Image (spheres, rainbow, N blue to C red):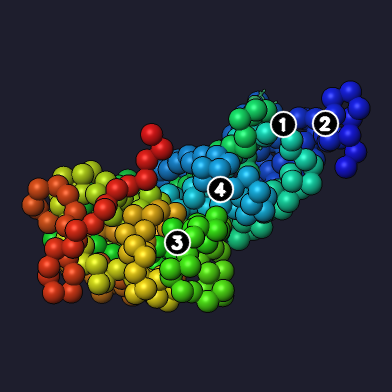
Amino acid sequence: MAQNPQTAEPSRPGEFDLIADYFAPLASRPGAFGLLDDAACLPARPGTDVVVTKDSLAANVHFLATDPPDLIARKALRVNLSDLAAKGAEPFAYFLSLALPPDWTEAWIADFTRGLREDQEMYGIDLYGGDTLKSPGGLVVSITAVGHLPTGTMVTRLGGRSDDLLFVTGTIGDAALGLKVHTGDPKVAEWHLAASQQAELRDRYLLPRPRVALCEAVRAHASAAMDVSDGLLGDLGKLCRASGLGAVLQSDRVPFSAPVASAIESGGAALDLALDGGDDYEVLLAIPPGRQADFEADAAKVGISTTRIGSLTKFAPGVSVIDAGGETVPMRSRSFEHF
Ligand code: ADP
Ligand code: MG
């Protein structure tokens, strides 16, 4: 790699060339002004509300600095799309703040922006702006995503009612176990998984599948919803607190993929890890009992599997976990916290 003899830094574009060569091509909508202006101008759509969310990913906290750049980019985008989906919002724009470590390379940026382009095409969204800065402490990717929905229809965490049925999309725990595979944790050996199963779990960690297609069904049927990012048990606790309710979760109903199910069977604390490990990016919903059939049908129509895992209760806030026989299961239940 070419080195600049004065600074011993790799030869690479300056900030403005970086924006012009790599980010402007991702920002082709009129309101983005080719990233040549101070700010973007998002078109207002009559009859809609704008839903905005922001999530940041830091190297060696949310991903490994050595992870493939295109996957880091797509993960950073997708964790935000997951938040929008859980609110029932259709994504259309995003803003990117990129704090680059001292040793960044142009090849890394090229891969990173290729990942963004792939997901822009997949989800029909566009870049409208951002910020680029130097970060001596390591890479931080921060994305703000913008979605819209019909005025007054955003689904909150606060709207749950007692006796609402709790549903979750997809499967739970894959990414939490996948992270252990990814980092080479010795615990993985206790799960006795085939190499292909380990690869499946690792893939779920590296590339979340946000349930964007569910957003209409969320709006149509859910009284409350949130995305599951910090562990199912802890996140359900947050929904309960916001709605002023408790919940009963039936551990035998939680949907697990084949690799997670066999890891749990082999012991090794995989159940705790699956239920509070995080990085699932599934949607947790409270559905009024009368809407169950319509919700399930609408989710099936967009190809998203949903599972009823329990219900909201009026008893004291908090989540109790019961097994198939109705016996209380003691759980570690702790949501991921940075501090
Ligand atoms: P200002 O100093 O006025 O904030 P900048 O020079 O930082 O403007 O940015 C110029 C333009 O480039 C702006 O439109 C900004 O949104 C865009 N921009 C800068 N960095 C990025 C990035 N990482 N991704 C997308 N757009 C960016
Ligand atoms: Mg700026």
List the residue tagged with mark 3. 187
Relative vertical location of residue 131 with respect to residue 244 in this rendering, above or below: above
Residue 262 appears in which quarter of the rendering?
Answer: bottom left
The quarter of the image that holds ligand 1 is top right
Asked if residue 47 shows in the view, the reply is no
Which quadrant of the rendered structure holds the C terminus? top left
Residue drawn at the location 34% of the way across and 62% of the way down: 269
Q: Residues within 10 Å of mark 1 (few under 14, many from 20)?
A: some
Q: Earlier in the sequence, mark 2 or mark 4?
A: 2
* Lateral position of residue 9 relative to residue 181, left or right: right
Q: Amino acid at mark 4?
A: Phe
Q: Amino acid at mark 2?
A: Glu
Task: Give how far apart the Cα atoms at labels 3 and 1 are.
Answer: 34 Å
Residue 197 drawn at (x, y percent): 52, 73
Which label belongs to residue 63?
4
Which label belongs to residue 9?
2
Q: Earlier in the sequence, mark 4 or mark 3?
A: 4
Residue drawn at the location 26% of the way across and 71% of the way down: 253
List the residue tagged with mark 1. 102
